[in-house]
Image (spheres, rainbow, N blue to C red):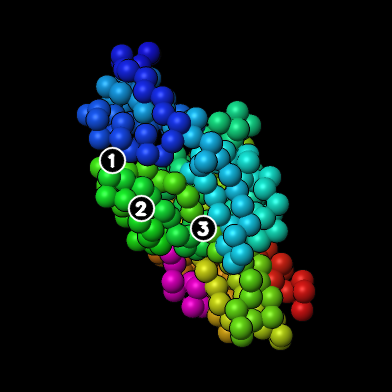
């Protein structure tokens, strides 16, 4: 199916994009187009105007910004994955991007478009939930910055006002806190085929002390209904050396916490995979955290 007729409105600055969104009613932003264009082809989205922001060069970057890695909204997935500051300081983000769809999608898709879509089956959201980056937006009333935990409101819903666009995010570098000796992280995903949307995905960050006991754990589960932060599972592993019994208890807590969209065997399967991949993610993050102690 072909998209309905629309008018193409190219812009080359953030100010021009904001002005265009004010001028044209029923307008959508076009960045990488990896989500919007399929929606247009199936007529689930039929905007009258596409404000094309692909030419805004000032939003196409990944930089080391001291205590954070700053990502421009038009940085492609591949650009982020290959950026040295991301590899060095937020490796789980590079790890998750390597599991997004295929090369054409990773080369064309953008950070801002993916974050604005807020698809809980996508690979970004679990990682962003435990990193909690600052998201900056610009609109008719100027610039504002919000933490991700306030920006993400739920499935396919974000705190983005009419006429606003995302311009950048600050991903905090993963460094051990004052009472920790090591920190490790990872992203694990289960899908039917390589590159598919996740049936279950888990992002994990683990901090340990000199004795190898967990001092802090952060977990997020995607793909199994709403994006889930299983706080009970996080509490269960803290203060332990993450033996098999603790891993099993954490997996059980995650299975209790998730809310699969499907009922019956499909939902049961997703619950089981959420538990299984929680164990795998915690094991990998713990191994990485203890490498340096």
| For residue 1, side relative to residue 68 (left or right) | left
| Image mark for residue 143 | 2
Q: Secondary structure at mark 3?
A: strand
Q: Residues within 10 Å of mark 3 (few under 14, many from 20)?
A: many
- Distance (Cα) linking label 2 and label 1: 12 Å
Image point (43%, 55%), residue name: 135
Q: Which residue is nearer to you in this view: 51 or 86?
A: 51
In the image, which residues are magenta?
228-236
Q: Earlier in the sequence, mark 3 or mark 1?
A: 1
Total numbered labels: 3
Q: Is residue 172 magenta?
A: no
| Image mark for residue 170 | 3
- Distance (Cα) linking label 3 and label 1: 22 Å
Image point (77%, 71%), residue name: 291
Q: Which residue is mark 1?
A: 163
Q: Are marks 3 and 2 in contact (CB under 8 Å)?
A: no
């Amino acid at each position: 199916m072909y998209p309905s007729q629309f008018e193409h409105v190219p812009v080359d600055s953030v100010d021009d994009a904001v002005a265009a969104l004010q001028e044209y009613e029923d307008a959508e932003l076009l960045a990488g187009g990896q989500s919007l264009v399929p929606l247009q082809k199936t007529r689930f989205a039929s905007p009258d105007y596409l404000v094309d922001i692909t030419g805004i060069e000032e939003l196409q970057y990944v930089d080391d910004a001291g205590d954070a890695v700053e990502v421009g909204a038009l940085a492609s997935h591949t650009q982020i994955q290959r950026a040295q500051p991301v590899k060095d300081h937020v490796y789980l983000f590079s790890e998750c991007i390597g599991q997004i769809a295929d090369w054409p999608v990773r080369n064309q898709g953008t950070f801002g478009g993916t974050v604005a879509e807020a698809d809980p089956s996508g690979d970004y959201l679990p990682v962003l939930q435990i990193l909690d980056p600052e998201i900056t937006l610009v609109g008719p009333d100027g610039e504002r910055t919000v933490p991700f935990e306030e920006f993400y409101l739920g499935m396919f819903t974000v705190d983005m006002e009419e006429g606003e666009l995302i311009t950048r995010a600050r991903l905090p570098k993963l460094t051990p806190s004052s009472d920790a000796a090591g920190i490790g992280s990872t992203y694990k995903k289960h899908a039917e085929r390589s590159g598919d949307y996740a049936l279950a995905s888990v992002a994990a960050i683990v901090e340990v002390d000199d004795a190898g006991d967990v001092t802090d754990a952060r977990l997020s589960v995607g793909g199994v209904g709403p994006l889930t932060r299983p706080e009970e599972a996080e509490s269960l592993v803290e203060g332990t050396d993450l033996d098999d019994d603790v891993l099993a208890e954490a997996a059980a807590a995650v299975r209790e916490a998730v809310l699969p969209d499907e009922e019956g065997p499909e939902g049961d399967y997703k619950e089981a995979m959420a538990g299984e991949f929680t164990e795998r993610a915690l094991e990998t993050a713990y191994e990485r955290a203890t490498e340096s102690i």
